[in-house]
Image: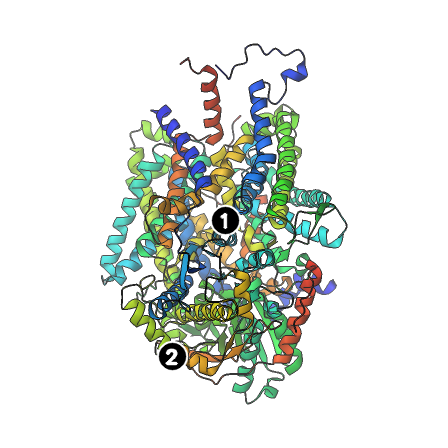
Amino acid sequence: MKLQARTMAALLGGAAMALGLAASPALAQGANEQFIPHLVYRTGPYAPNGIPFADGVADYYKMINERDGGINGVKIAFEECDTGYNTDRGVECYERLKNKGATGAAGVIPLSTGITYALIERSYADKIPVFSSGYGRADASDGRVFPYVFTLPATYWTGADAAVTYIGQQMGGVDKLKGKKLAFVYHDSAFGKEPLPLLEALKNKYGFELKTFPVAPPGLEQKATWLQIGRQYRPDYTIMWGWGVQNSTAIKEAAAVGYPMEKLVGVWWAGSEQDVVPTGDAAKGYKAIAFHAPGAEYKVIRDIKQHVHGKGQASGDGSHIGTVLYNRGVFNAVAMVEAIRAAQEKHGNKPLTGEQVQTGFENLNLSTEKLARLGLEGFMQPFKTSCADHEGMTPVRIQQWNGKQWQFVSDWIEPNRDLIRGLVEESAKKYAAEKKIELRTCS
Amino acid sequence: MTGMLYELTIGPFVAMAEFPLFFIEVLVGGLLSGVMYSLVALGFVLIFKASGVFNFAQGAMVLFAALFFAGFMDMGMPVLVALVLTIGVMVLLAYSIERVVLRPLVNQPHIILFMATIGITFFIDGLGQQIWGSGIRSIEIGLPKQPINFGEVQINAFDIISAFAAGLLVAGLALFFQYTRIGRALRAVADDHQAALSVGIPLQTIWVIVWTVAGIVALVAGIIWGSKLGVQFSLAMVALKALPVLILGGFTSIPGAIIGGLIIGAGEKLGEVYWGTALGGGIEEWFAYMLALGFLLFRPQGLFGEKIIERV
Amino acid sequence: MIYREAGQFKTSYAADQAIFPIRQDRIGVALILLVAFFGVPFAANDYFLSTIFLPFLVFSLAALGLNILTGYCGQLSLGTGGFMATGAFAAYKFATAFPDMHIVFVLICAGLATAGVGMLFGLPSLRIKGFYLAVATLAAQFFLIWLFVKVPWFTNYSPSGVISAPPMKLWGDVWVTGTGATAATRYLFCLSVVAVLAMLAKNMVRSSIGREWMAIRDMDIAAEIIGIRPLRTKLIAFGVSSFYCGIAGALWAFCYTGSVEPGAFEISRSFQILFMVIIGGLGSIVGCFLGAAFIILLPIFLSNAPALVGLSISVATVSHMEAMVFGALIIFFLVVEPHGLARLWQIAKEKLRLWPFPH
């Protein structure tokens, strides 16, 4: 009995190893299809946020195939790979999928700062665009140092700048910020620390007092942090840079110490339904910055409902349509598709390589008319990319949770373009020096 | 340098004395959250006491129980029905663990059993999320969440109620162990498996009972923590918070879990607020472990643990 | 029939005490090394090299380190991730502070730095034993990760806290890190490092220090009575183990991922390495490699298996199934063969000696 069990164990062990080595699935791919890998996290600690985003991206791709027959006739083929927000699984997914399809991957959306950093390393050799919209490295906006990384439409620096400007506006003007107290609560990781240099620069510019409160990931314990903020420091406004369970915990703890929700402004990754619903009524009045609109009333969302959900093709369970993170997924997919379309104008209406799609990303011009044609009127701001500017730096808006849904409560706030671009170029130069990268010349 | 030295040694106490009311708030907040840690630690202690197994799956059991409870409630059942059903699920879980994992590994060294519980952790993590999905769920059973003011000092109502619930549970368990027949049998099994067997105590049944009780403790912890944080994957990481409590209090003592929890909870919060800024903030994670480690160096078996008698 | 020692006579003590006394073993190992050095880089594509073989090598090295500490010396440690992080960051600091230092020296210095840290955190082991020690090593794990996140000096004041390996070369134009390094070069470099260190480890555990470790593991009080100094032995175990884990961490950051943040070395990493050691076999060098292969290949197999069989399952289900199968397999292995895959391999060899005869 023991012997048979042992033999089984040996066979299982050997089989798993052998098959693991052999497993390199070659899924049949159409010759005239553009392949896009779809890195998602439907499991793991950040799954509640990853699921609506993944659904948004997938639904938009499907809609383009259904409604338009693809991008100028070239259908999109995408394959999901679950990363669990884990950097080495993300890299493994990327390596497995990057050469699939007729011409390889058009681009990749990592949705994780850790995976983004790892893929940036590989982007130089693989020549596949890394599209890290609103996360990742803020200095990757400098296209001369990072030819294959795109941070459009706004980076953390643009967002933090907009948050401070909004707070200033609430006080009667940015000159009124002098001497006021601001608190910055952040996820103690690359993601959370990214805005710090910009906040320091703004502190010097406007003269406010800034105290930073790091929260150790994943952020389950924040009682001490919020006791300090709410009962000891008592700032005029608090900016929060969190992701996942840290956000809902923070809102709960803030409510528990009686900190007013209207004075709490979160980053766009801390402003979704998943962050406020667990807290219930106490979250009413909480604000967040956003570069796109929430809600399901936009034509693009209606088209998805009609062409994808209506035909029973919804990704996931279809319940997240119109939520903040779903719409963000849609935005990411829109940018990817439009980049491919722009690249096709140069290289022809056929499946393109990553290198060719990169030219599309660099010549993206989403004007107001184009947005209206795409069904995105009012959904987001128009922007333009170029060889040196991979960000576009669109204005940002503030949305507020009223207990049932997110609503815009401010106009589109212009960023301090020169200040931010200056910081971007300085930081990119340092990176280039460290990695011995030569700056591209952009005409 | 001297500034840093001051900030680390005298500064915190000066700050405490400067604003005594805030200090009391932090202290009370810490004690109350410490009680919540004890809840999770209790499950560990129960299983270790009765079967000598360090059950790493306790955190996953908290998540598992919370998922089923939240899931049943989302399906529309009233609170009591959901509670009873979830207890049933935990009984089933305890029985399967005993059958599949504990019985075949009866005489193995402790590290093997520990590894087996890690395997259980993965299994029930996957199972729970496969059945109920990875989305976030909230548990609303009417616990109040707003702060209450005692004069100038503000304490959160939720913390008080959860501390009360945990205290009740602990008192109940302590009485159970002291005064009932099964409690005595559990203590006998913890002392010596062979001797307990020879006196006629059914080992397998005892183990199922112990794991069920631990499961119920996990359920209570899951409901309380789930109301606080929402039911999601990160809940399983609460177990890591309970480990310093275990080191401090000893692996085999129920009062140790409580006292250890209080010390760790209070120490953690006070450390973060008063020493944290000097060290850059965010020290909560390792401060508890360092505190426990410090205690261990003076008392290797924890405050209340059984002195380890080694024989050559 | 094939695997027999009949006819192989040893004429010196040295020959008798060789690591592979049987000629067939020597041939086998030589073949494996030949294939590994010359066959794999040419036959395997980039994907296999950089996402399967490279992490396999790095993980085997870390598993070697942990096995020395837990398998041979009996000190259960959950701080492996923290020590790997120390190695990665130490290597980064050495590489950036001394840009002309050769990568081999950078690795050695990083290993020595980690050994120092490891010995520091090993000091409590004299007072604390068993699970208490395991939980105490968690203190090391959390503290080290916090340190690298918090103190900007470690990342050369980078705002993001992510370190990326500067391009370094072995000689001439052969780059092993940075964007100029091909997967094959990185693989061969790591393979050489791991081969040398594994050889060292095998010799260490067969020598007197190895025997002292095993004595402490089996009966530490009796060991102390016969004259083995427990603190010295345990500290050496922590030091050597951390040396290996440190180099593994440095190779992870430099050759495998290219850039790393402290979050890559969290507690889940420590558990992953512990699994490799347990499933591979505690107290066995070859077990480290078997365990690492198993843990790396199993998730890949599980995520690709449904496609191979033709089923299309949602990505989330696949991940959940992975976790469940993983947990179930761990329990299965522990029940059936608690000494791990290495023991299974040993039994296979014993059977092979008699084959085709039954006994």
Residue A245: which quarter of the image? bottom left
Image location of residue A394, percent across then percent down: 53, 78
Image location of residue A208, percent across then percent down: 62, 80
Residue at horizontal 64 percent and vertical 54 percent from the top: C179
From what the image shows, is residue A263 above or below residue C270?
Answer: below
Q: Is residue B219 visible?
A: no
- The chain that hosts pointer 1 is C
Image location of residue A1, percent across then percent down: 33, 24
C-alpha gap between disc 1 and disc 2: 38 Å
> Within 10 Å of the Cα at label 2, are there few (<14), some (14-19), or many (20+) other Cα atoms?
some
Residue at horizontal 55 percent and vertical 73 percent from the top: A363
Residue sticking out furthest to the front: A348
Instruction: Check disc 1 and report the residue beneath it.
Output: C268
Number of callouts: 2
> Within 10 Å of the Cα at label 1, are there few (<14), some (14-19), or many (20+) other Cα atoms?
some
Question: Residue A402's mark?
Answer: 2
Residue B93: which quarter of the image? top left
Q: Nearer the viewer, residue B115 or A26?
A: A26
Inspect the image, locate mark 2, and give the three-letter code of the amino acid beneath it. Answer: Asn
